[in-house]
Amino acid sequence: MRYRTLSLALLAALAGAAAPAWALDRATVERLAFGASDERIEAVGALVAEGDPQAAALLQAFADGAVRTAGKRVLVLRGDEAVDPLTDEKIAPPADLEDVVLNNRLRSAIGTALAALQLLSPDRAVRFAAATELTSSADPSMLPLVRKALEHEVDPGIRSALEMIAAAMALKGGTQASRLAAIRTLGRSNNPNSATLLLESAADADPAIRLEAQRSLRAVEGRLAWGERLGLAFAGVSLGSILLLAALGLAITYGLMGVINLAHGELIMVGAYTTYVVQNLFKTHASGAFDWYLVCAVPAAFAVAAAVGMLLERVVIRWLYGRPLETLLSTWGISLVLIQTVRTLFGAQNVQVENPSFMSGGVQVLANVVLPWNRIVIIFFAAGVLAAMWLLLTHTRLGLFVRAVTQNRAMASCVGVPTGRVDTWAFGLGSGIAGLAGCALSQIGNVGPELGQGYIVDSFMVVVFGGVGQLAGTVYAALVLGFANKLLESWSGAVIAKIAVLAFIIIFIQRRPQGLSALKGRALEA
């Protein structure tokens, strides 16, 4: 059906408003209908070679099963009439009509031929789709049509694809000179498919072909290697930004307040489910503005998670300061309560949070590197959250109080700082940032009751590795662990990478208990 629609558009562009006279070669049409398998494939290539719109119509008729034979005559059924494609004569369908049987090989050849004919379409999207399909299925017999399309193509992306297609065709069947030229063209490509084609030629019997193919293959592999490095670097930054978001809240509740909060992962989950609820509200009541639901989901995730965190601090954690074992056990129990509450409200199955349209897809920087928009947005979002947190802690009254209580609680209380209220607000701030992490995580995966369990250990590793009480160390640690995880994954897989990173942190903390960034000055005395 896709080929039929595109072929009709192609015919309208090439043939104009008036219906043209048929101008097909009789022998070619008869070979296509009556010939052996190889002869029929050759006939398809011959019909495509000139880019004739009548050939497109006939091939589409074959693909639709509308072609019949009557003796030695080839006919195309159109409703109650039979049309001779060679003379355009319309007759009543003869009684001795027989079906033309197409095997899978011939169907594939006709589909590829129709795609090749669409290279001449005035619609850029149609031409791009045709070039994409021909990249992996072009036949050397279609080379004249590809070259004809190249003469008229002005779009850089499509021209690049057509040049590679033409080179691949010439490489399969041509003179030594044309094959060498094709190899050099492929050697300038960044497409991974060109490496596959060159690899085949690198074992050619012709020494000149083999040497040139090996040289071009090294050049292509070098460029692809840089693409892989760029992709790995982006993956490291992306994972680092996610770890940073997950650990920033913990850097306050554990790093600054000394509370071992095992419910931190569930606060991340609360933010993710808040995003899910806001999304559903937009779907129900403001579907036309769905792309803007994140504008409301971000502050909502922060507020709900912060409110839950402040409630926990006032009701439970406030009475356990200075008692780390009891705090650990109580927050673990709270995490179980939050998980079960979410299961009761939303069910045990994962729920899906959709990306807004501006976060869908990605940007292709190299042929083998596509950077997803949702990951790019999360990186900038993490940087924005970090900047806002730094400004709050260094340029606001609350930030001044938090730093004062962190450095010397007794002295801060003596000079009038409401330490109890500061604890509540600081815990709420850390919990709200955890909610923001949940909002971000909802954009890269499904949301479920166990979401936070996958990040609590990583969050503690980031905070401890960076240095307790040091936000700068948290940033460095998140990026280092993100890069280390992705680098090790590329070598040994995800499981071994996790084990290696954990072993490294254990050894590092034994050698340097204060982490990457050590506390200085009077903070050491607190």
Image (tube, grey):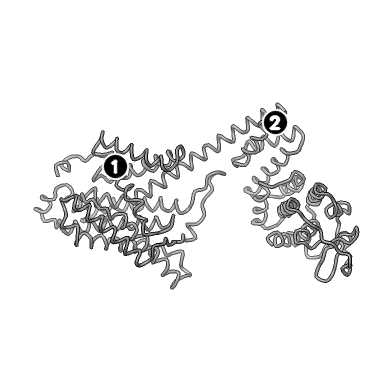
Q: Quadrant of residue 278?
A: bottom left
Q: Amino acid at mark 1?
A: Gly
- Distance between the Cα atoms at labels 2 and 1? 55 Å
Type of amino acid under label 2: Asp
Q: Nearer the viewer, residue 259 or 348?
A: 348
**Residue farthest along the top direction in this orientation:** 207
Q: Is residue 8 left or right of residue 338?
A: right
Q: Which of pointers 2 and 1 indicates the residue nearer the eye?
A: 2
| Position of residue 456 in the picture relative to residue 205 (left or right) | left
Question: In the rendering, which numbered label is found on residue 447?
Answer: none
**Numbered marks: total:** 2
Percent coordinates x, y for residue 186 in the rendering: 65, 38
Can you name the residue that lies furthest to the bottom here?
Answer: 285
Numbered mark located on residue 466 in the image: 1
Q: Position of residue 133 (x, y in %)?
A: 66, 51
Residue 340 point in image, percent of width and height: 32, 62
Q: Position of residue 386 (x, y in %)?
A: 32, 50
Question: Who comes first in sequence, dot 2 or dot 1?
Answer: 2
Q: Are marks 2 and 1 in contact (CB under 8 Å)?
A: no
Q: Residue at x 45, y 44 (%)?
A: 234
Q: Secondary structure at mark 2?
A: loop
Q: Secondary structure at mark 1?
A: helix
The image quadrant that residue 78 belongs to is bottom right
Q: Residues within 10 Å of mark 2 (few under 14, many from 20)?
A: some
Residue sitting at x 31%, y 44%: 461
Give the residue number, with chain letter if any, for mark 2.
204
Question: Up-down: is 398 above or below 520?
Answer: below
